[in-house]
Image (tube, helix red, strand yellow):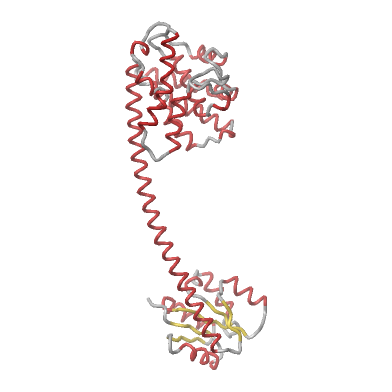
Amino acid sequence: MEKDTILIVEDMEINRELLAEIFRNEYKILEAENGEEGIRVFEENVESLAVVLLDIMMPVMDGFQVLEYLSKRDLLSKVPFILITGEDSVESEKRGYEYGVVDYIKKPYHADVVNQLVKNVIELFKYKSQLETMVKTQTAKLEIQNELLSEQAKKLRRMNEIMIDALSNVVEFRNMESGQHVKRIREFTKCMGKVVMRMFPEYGLTPEKLETITQASSMHDIGKIVIPDSVLLKPGKLTAEEFEIIKTHTTKGGEMVSKLLKLDDDEFSDYCYDIARHHHEKYDGKGYPDGLKGEEISIAAQIVSLADVYDALVSHRVYKGAFSVDEAYRMIVDGECGAFSPKILEAFAVVKSEFEELANRYKESE
């Protein structure tokens, strides 16, 4: 509906007539002689009102009472208000502006000044309304686009998860494993991560980050796909040369992640790469492939590293039998499997029984 009407709320008829005469050639004019009547006329015609000229001093309801009534009903933002006053009061002006009044008209009226003031207010409010409409429209479009992008990202991530599971299963098959290894690593990672998040907030873990790390842990051994069977499945002790070949599964894994993962989720991709490459780094710098030391190793790689070592100890492998959970715990804590950070070992002590329960649960289902 076109905003083509001016409402004048003024108790003195002569003042209403003076104001109406200024705008009669360009706008429809509605009049009210007190605040109560003004509210009724306002509510009946709000959609067509371009501006309201509201006197402060009136019988029945004064101007501020009208503003208070309309404010409580969230109606003041629909139409610009200009207050009419015969006095110079800073407190009165301040009170009006607090309600959202746009400007003041001082008595006695000067037709040219009033005409220009009202026109300016109407144009500014019209421009403001157009901007708000434009912003709402653009916001709605962006919300739809974001929803579509979010759905696409979810589908793409799901495709990557399916690919990760498939590749992980290939690794397990080549390792002559049962198919439970990746599941156990995920569970150990999540279990350890929750404790680290609670005990050591300085690492900045959140439930969302931990979920991402848990998913990314599946990629830790992906590089073993390219290791020759003669080395990967050797039942005896590896030679120094063969061990160097095994070690390349970390760098190869990182390369594979970079080439295979196509996802608009840098955090997930980065975790996958980091875990694949660095899950054999040791806290004392004696790990591989990069010889990272201390907190140079990300907390994600540290957590997955311990999970992987524990699982290797308590599981049967082609080159060894399974250790008991108590022996596996002792070997890790005593440093027989390489150095872990004091914080990781402290968290490990807390999850000891949970790790044992997880190891037994998945062992029984193999």
The mark tally for this picture is 0
Residue 252 falls in image quadrant: top left
In the figure, 277 relative to 121: above or below? Answer: above
Q: Nearer the viewer, residue 192 or 44?
A: 192
Could you tell me residue 232's position as x and y percent? 37, 13
Left or right position of 85 against 365: right
Residue 44 visible to the viewer: no
Give the answer, above or below, for where 89 lies relative to 297: below
* Residue 110 visible within the image: yes
| Residue located 45% across and 65% down the image | 132
> Residue 286 appears in which quarter of the rendering?
top right
What is the x, y in percent for residue 149?
37, 47
Give the position of the N terminus as an image quadrant: bottom left
* Picture coordinates of residue 127, whole percent (x, y): 46, 71
Q: Position of residue 108 (x, y in %)?
A: 60, 89
Q: Quadrant of residue 59?
A: bottom right
Name the residue furthest bottom.
14
Which image quarter is the C terminus in?
A: top left
Residue at 60% of width from left, 73% of height from top? 97
Can you say whether 65 is above or below 190 in the image? below
Q: Nearer the viewer, residue 47 or 202?
A: 202
| Residue at (54, 12) in percent of width and height | 336
